[in-house]
Amino acid sequence: MSHIALVTLVVHDYDEALAFYTDALGFELVEDTDRGDGSRWVVVRPRGTQGTGLLLARAKDEAQSASVGAQTGGRVGFFLHTEDFAADHARMTAAGVRFLEEPRHEVYGSVAVFEDLYGNRWDLLQPA
């Protein structure tokens, strides 16, 4: 096995999630395929990378809907690496991304926790 290709992120709505990840975070749309049953196969990933992508999967029932925004139990569950922390932090802030703290400069790098549109917690991280 060479790598993890996709991680599923359960969302309430395909289009609002797609807008957040492409517009606010700057991800690229890799695929958006109608599956013919009312569902879609929607994949995004950080622009210009070939790494792991997010499969944006619309919740199908009450149990899945209840997990939207809490897929990691309130912990930071996603880690977005950057090569220019200051520029990406400023761009994301201007795009309306909600940061939960001021940037910190730790021994492992520069970091700030933010929430996606549903409340999932992410680290924006420039490794040292």
Image (cartoon, grey):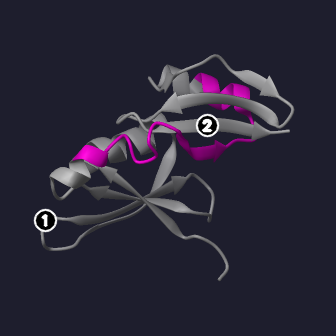
Q: Is residue 98 left or right of residue 17?
A: right
Q: Mark 1 or mark 2: name the one nearer the start of the chain.
A: 1
Q: Amino acid at mark 2?
A: Asp
Q: Secondary structure at mark 1?
A: loop
Rendered location of residue 52, percent (x, y): 57, 63
User: Label 1 belongs to which residue?
Assistant: 38
Q: Is residue 59 left or right of residue 118?
A: left
CA gap between label 1 and label 2 equals 33 Å
Give the magenta-colored segment's residue range. Answer: 66-90
The answer to whether residue 20 is above or below residue 94 is below
Q: Is residue 71 left or right of residue 67?
A: right
- Whether residue 95 can be seen here: yes
Q: Residues within 10 Å of mark 1 (few under 14, many from 20)?
A: few
Q: Is residue 70 magenta?
A: yes
Q: Tell me the residue at 62%/64% (across/down).
A: 51
Q: Is residue 40 left or right of residue 42?
A: left
In the rendered view of the protein, which quadrant contains the N terminus? bottom right
Q: Residues within 10 Å of mark 2 (few under 14, many from 20)?
A: some
Rendered location of residue 69, percent (x, y): 36, 40
Nearest to viewer (mark 1 / mark 2):
2
Q: Amino acid at mark 1?
A: Gly
Q: Residue furthest bottom?
A: 1
Q: Tell me the residue at 31%/59% (across/down).
A: 57
Q: Quadrant of residue 108?
A: top right
Q: Is residue 33 magenta?
A: no
Q: Which mark is residue 124?
A: none
User: Label 2 belongs to which residue?
Assistant: 123
In the rendered view of the protein, which quadrant contains the C terminus? top right
